[in-house]
Amino acid sequence: MRPTLRPVAFLRTFLAVLTAACLTAPAAMAQLKLEITSGVTNPVPIAIVPFAESPTDGTDVADVVQHDLVGSGRFTALPRNKMPATPTSPAQVKFADWKAAGSDYMVVGQVVPVAGGQIAVDFNLLNTLTGQSIARQRFTGSAAALRNAAHRVSDVIYQAITGIRGAFATRIAYVAVVPDGAEQRFQLVIADADGYNQHLILESRFPIMSPAWSPDGQWIAYVSFENHLSAVYVQRVQSGQRSRVSMRAGINGAPAWSPDGRRLALTLSGDTGHPQIYLLDLSDQRLTRLTDSPSINTEATWSPDGRFIYFTSDRAGEPQIYRIGATPGSPTQRITFTDEYNAGPHLSPDGKLLAMVTRDDGGNYRIAVQNLATGDFRVLTNGRLDTSPSFAPNSATIMYAERPGQAQAGILATISVDGLTGLSLKPTQGEVRDPAWGPFIQ
Amino acid sequence: MYRRTLVLMLLAGCLGLAACAHKPPKPSPEQQQSTAGGPGAESQGAEGGANANGGPFGNQNSVAGPQQGLLAKRTVYFDFDSAVIKGDGTDIVAAHAKYLSDHADARVRLEGNTDERGSPEYNIGLGMRRAQAVRQALLLQGASASQITVVSYGAEHPVDPAHNEDAWSKNRRVDIVYLTPNMQPPQAPQ
C-alpha cells in the first residue's frame, strides 16, 4: 500500500460575504475565492498588528500579510480583538503582553509617504520571547502596488521564520471557462498567487490550454484552437502582443520554456504521425526533434540546468514519465514505475521533485510527487479528478486543477509538497483549470 | 488535531483593494497573425491583450454535408483508453468513406475527443490517436488523404459536461465534420 499523506481532513466551508460588492466587476470575469482546506499540526503563533497607514488606498497591509502566512498552513495568527495594543514601531511594544497573548512572533509596521508621490512600507518582525528584531525592511513603490508590497512583507517573514523563500509575491496563469448564453468562453487569466489582481489576456470561443511562463515572467506560451486549428502562441503579458510560433498539421501542444528562455519544447504530431517532443529555437524558428517512438510522447518539462526533458509516453503501453537529454540522439530513461498511469509531469524549480497525475486502483486521478534522488513516490491529494500540477517557484507548494464532485465545476487548489497544507481557489462562476505558477518576480 | 478553516472572498476590483480586472480590447477578427514568430519576431495583438474570438465553437458545421441514411451520423464512439472504432461506428465510417470516395470535392475534418479524466495534453494525444483511427479507416475504404484534416481537442470539447460514466462514454468520440456543403445527392448504398 502506497503511503498517502493526508493526516488532516480537508474542510470545505463556505462563507458568503461581500458578494454584493462584486456587482461592479465585469460580468464575464469570474472571481476567485480562496479557502484554506487544511493546515500543519504545529503552526507558529504570530501577531500581525495593523499597520499605521497614511496614505491608504484601502489595502489593509497587515490583513494581506496575515492571510498569506495563515494560508501557508505554517502560521496561526492572533485575532485583532485579542491584541493587547496596537503598536506600529518596536519602541511601542510591551513584549510581556504579547508573550502572554501566546504569540511567539509579532510584526509591526507603517505605510508612509515618501518623495516623488510614492509610498514606503516599513515593517519589523520581532521575537516576543527575546524582544529582538529578526527582520526589518522598507519597500518603496507606487501606492497602486501596496498589495504587492504586502506580499513582499509576507515573503520576508516567511523566509525569516521557516528558512524557505516565500512565494507570495508571485503570479499565476490559468484558463477560465465561463458560460456565455448557450456557448462558453475560454479565458486566459493572469492573477496574483492569491487570486487577486486578475487580468484577462486572451478570450476565445475556442479552447485555450497549457499556459506556460517564460523564465523571466514576461511571456506566456499557450495552446489555442482558434478556427478549429491547434496552434502554439507566445504572448507578452504586459502588452498583449503575441506571435504564433507553431501551427503545423496535427497536434501543436504542451509548450515548455527552456530555463534560459531561448527555446520551447513542443509536442507536434503532423497529419499522420505520433506525437513527438520537439525543441523550437525562438530566435530562428529552427525545429529539432527529440523523441522518436511510435507512441504518444508529450508534456515536456525541463530540468533546471536545461540538460534534460521529462515527458509522458505510453511506449510501454500505458503512460509513464521518461527522461531524455535535450540534445538529439540522447538516450531515454524511464522514471516512474508506481501505478499504471502517470502523466502530466512538472519538475520542481529546484530539480528535486517530479509532480504528476497518477491514477490509483480506484480509478481516481491524483497529484503525486516522486523524489528523483530516492525514488520515493507519494500521493499528495485525495481528489477524484486532479490534474495539471504546477510548482511554486520556491518548490514548496504545488497548484493543480481539481473537479471536486459529480456536479461541480473545476477549481484550482494548492497542496504543500509534504501533503499537509491545502488551499482552494474557487471561481464565482464557470470553472478554472490548467494553472501555471509563474517565476519569482525580481 | 489542529484544524483551521478560513474563508476569504477574493474580489479583485470589487472593493477598490486591487487593480480592476479588465477585459482586453477586441482587435478585428480579420487581423492577420504571423506564423513562426518568436519573442521579438513579427507579432500581432492589441495593447492590453489579444482576442481570439471567431465564430461559435459548437458543432454547427455538422449541418453541412450529406444527410442520407448513415451519412447523417457524424460521431464514432470509443471505449475507455481505446482507439478501436466500435459498434455502428464501423458502418458509419464506411458510409462516409464511400461518400468521400464518390465526391472528390468533399472535405472533412476529423475531431478527436476524450473524456475528462487524466492529464489534458496526454488526452490531446489520445484524441489524435482516435482521429487517426478514423482517418485510416476512411483511407482504406477509398477516401483520399487530401480530403481529410485532423484535430484533437482532447478533453476540451465535451458534448456532455457531467462528471460521470454516462457523460464520459458520450465524450469519447470522433466527430466527422464536413467543411464544404455538398448539394449533390449521395449515391445510393450499393
Image (cartoon, coloured by chain):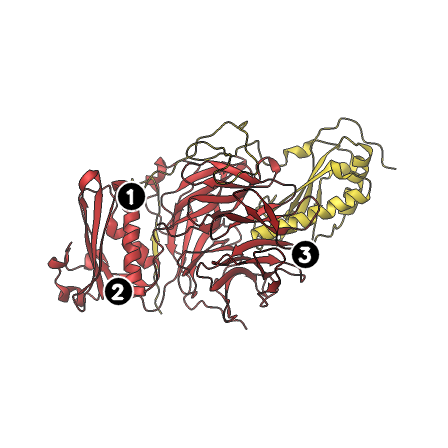
Task: Determine the secondary structure under disc 3.
Answer: loop
- Residue at numbered disc 1: A145
The percent coordinates of residue B114 (x first, y second) are 63, 49
Is A216 or A96 nearer to us in this picture? A216
Question: Could you tell me how many numbered marks the image carries?
Answer: 3
The colour assigned to chain B within the rendered structure:
yellow
- Residue at numbered disc 3: A293
Task: Determine the secondary structure under disc 2.
Answer: strand
Q: Quadrant of the C terminus of chain B?
A: top right
- Residue at numbered disc 2: A45
Task: Determine the secondary structure under disc 1.
Answer: helix
Residue lying at 44% horizontally and 67% vertically, measured from the top left: A6
Say which label, 1 or 2, has the lower sequence index. Answer: 2
Q: Chain of mark 3?
A: A
Which corner quadrant of the image does residue B73 belong to? top right
**Residue A422 in the figure: left or right of residue B37:** left
Q: Report how far apart the C-alphas of labels 1 and 2 lie in the structure.
A: 28 Å
Letter of the chain in red: A
The percent coordinates of residue A246 (x first, y second) are 58, 41
